[in-house]
Image (cartoon, coloured by chain):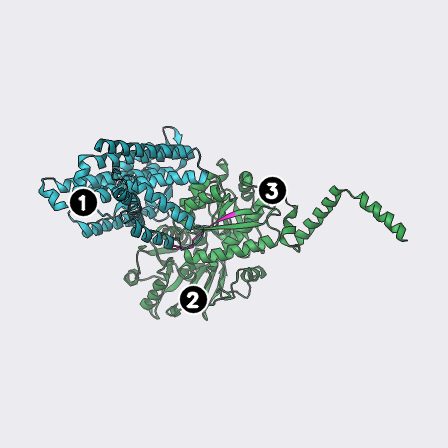
Amino acid sequence: MVESVKPNRKKQISGVSRRKALAGLGGAAAGATVSGVLPGFVRYAQAQTSAPIKIGFQVHRTGIGAAYGRWYDRTTRAAAQLINESGGINGRPIEIIAEDDGTDPKRGAEVVEKFATQHGADVAFGTLFSHVVIGSAPRAGELKIPYFVVSEGHHVASGILNRYTLQPGITDVKSQVQSMAPWVASNLGKKVTMIYPDFAFGHDHRDYFSAAMAAQGGEVIGKIAIPPTESSFFKYFPKIPRGTEVLYHVMVGPGVLTFVKEMGEFFGSKRPEIFGFIDSLEAVSINSPGLEFLEGSYFWEANPRYAQAKSSKFDAFYRAKVGVDETGASVDDPKDIATYSHMFGCWETLHTIKQGMEAAGYRGPGDRAKLIEAVEAIDNMEESQAHPQGAKIFNGKTHQVFGHQFISKVGGGKLNVVHKTSIEDGFYKDEVDYTSQPL
Amino acid sequence: MRSRWVNKATALHLGVIAVLFALQFVLPDYHHVNLARVMVLASFAMGYNIAFGYTGLLSLGHAMFFAAGLYAAGLMALFAGVGAGGGLLLGVIAGLVVAAAVGCLALRTTGVSFMIVTLMFAQAAFLATFYFGEYTRGDEGFVIPSNLRSLFGLSLVEPTTRYFVALTLFSLCMAVSFAIARSSMGRVLAAIRENEERTRMLGYNVFLYKLVALVISGAISGAVGAAYGMLFGYVGATFASIQYSILPLLWVLMGGAATVLGPFVGTLLMFYLVDISSGFTSANMLIVGLALIGLILFFPKGILGTLRERAAPWLP
């Protein structure tokens, strides 16, 4: 018996060529990769090269965007770790190369150049503040490096940038604002006074919301612009016209907490309905002293900071991976509030880059044009681990994604979602067709 | 002796231009574009040096002159379709006119008062970019269409063209600085810097000399602003902020005030100090600060200023 086994065994071994054995091993490894059970170096083994795909991460570590940048960084690293644990992209791990842009457009352009020409990054990614995006995008276009921004600015869809700049992870401000107007007009009032920062971001709110309210039969009766250098806001509140039914506020920067507190001191117990964009309180606890008057007021949120009864399992997964608890704070420090309505864009954008690269069969910088075309071909994004904020529709012509928006009411020291818009609420007519530009 | 020094100095400056010309053939892509940017910014610092280094006018308003050129070129490109050639010319005119207007008022003051008045004017100009946000898009700024960014049929989007334009601008600014430093006017400016009252007593129209120096400085700053917009494609309010008044001051102090090449040395060092340190830490400005302290301790008159004092008196 032993003897008979030996020949058989010998025969079996001699009957399997090295090529077949390697193919078998490769197939097994690929199968295991899909199930995500093998350690990293084995999972990357079936790719032609195991060199990492380099993602240049333009992060606001310093400057006005630092609070956002810290959470963008944290979210990006969590998403990269998840992608790598799941087999990377096309069997290759991804490497995040982070560079501080100081939230400055000149430095931002230099950082994009550094990604493209020094680090050899495959793509650039992650910029939030609009002026940095607009300052950097021309260089990204000239260097032909795909530039995936997470800015929510309307600059991409407005057509002022170029084919190499895309925003597939977060809805733009025009869409956000437009989708709020029907609910505000139906539930809070039709006479609105807006308080907004006197720069481009605030002007976008002013212009798009005014138009959207007019379409709902409402009217913006007061427009109060706050200069960018302002540190005290009391003098602006008496300008709010009588007859205001809804006060709409959106502020960003270091003065936001002062602004909201002074608004509470001004109004006391008598106030109109208040509707704000959560930008006014991103990274700030809703339970901070002086904010008690916000009880009963409303906020737009792109992604609900507080976990809701109806929150998806994907949101719970995302919170756990990034390290955010059910109140929107860091699991390590309850006082460290996340920029929850923005940072999901980094997570989702990285997953969209993965989807695009896999569809394009991306191998290296020579395939950047294919990557752009593959991302342009994406349309529906299902709610999933890759898209925990919710389903989305990507417009390949305008390079802009559209998603659900949320309206939350402050109650019991929490933000409770009272309305979720449809994706279609945020649609508007295309203003550009980037696919007509050469690659 | 003097003639030999002039020849030596001329040879040095021509040599610097020759080296910069040659470097484009050997530099890697990243440093190629960096050097083009440094040459443009160094030209801004050279303009600043004419006011501060040679004349002693401590201005905190040069961001305004830079932005005047930047917006003149950018807005005319965006709304009137003016190309790079016209934009550069408009930049010079804008910088010149704004500097003349501000100079007529601000030069009634001296010393710290001059610094504060120029700062106030610059802050007003900065806020004007927000006030006219309908056209300027305020802080966000705008992109200059790439089809308008060409000069004599050559696209400024191309790295080689960009480098040549930057080198040409740099060479012109260096020539102007060198000529002023070597001229009788330059000596009068230095006299004003050292002792304004005595210069006035000697019969010179101090106000007029200072105004001319500021106008030349403003015109160069405006030209550089226009060039920056055309070469890198972006116009935004950041470039009108106080930061861009302080930066040329730092570059000049670092390289050596009242030296022709000092602004270039300072700009180059500062650029790479920020670039390299930001790769390691977000506290990169702390490193820059420490470097500046070290510089003050060991090179109190800036790198080339101290070198001139200790070893090379012929440096202009």
Residue at the (44%, 43%) spot, across then down? A113
* Circle 3: element type: loop
Q: Amino acid at mark 3?
A: Gly
- Callout 3: 10 Å neighbours few (<14), some, many (20+)? some
Q: Amino acid at mark 1?
A: Arg
Marks 1 and 2 belong to one chain? no
Q: Which residues are magenta?
A: A55-64
In the rendered image, residue A157, in percent from the top left (x then y), is placed at 45, 45
Q: Is residue B1 left or right of residue A380?
A: left
Q: Amino acid at mark 2?
A: Ile
Q: Chain of mark 3?
A: A
* Circle 1: element type: helix
* Circle 2: element type: loop
Q: Is residue A165 above or below residue A279?
A: above
Does residue A60 belong to the magenta stretch? yes
Choose the circle earlier in sequence order: 3 or 2. 2
State the separation of the CA atoms marked 3 and 1.
66 Å
What is the drawing colour of chain B?
cyan
- Callout 1: 10 Å neighbours few (<14), some, many (20+)? some
In the rendered image, residue B274, in percent from the top left (x then y), is placed at 39, 49
Which residue lies under the disc numbered 1? B193
Label at residue A286: 2
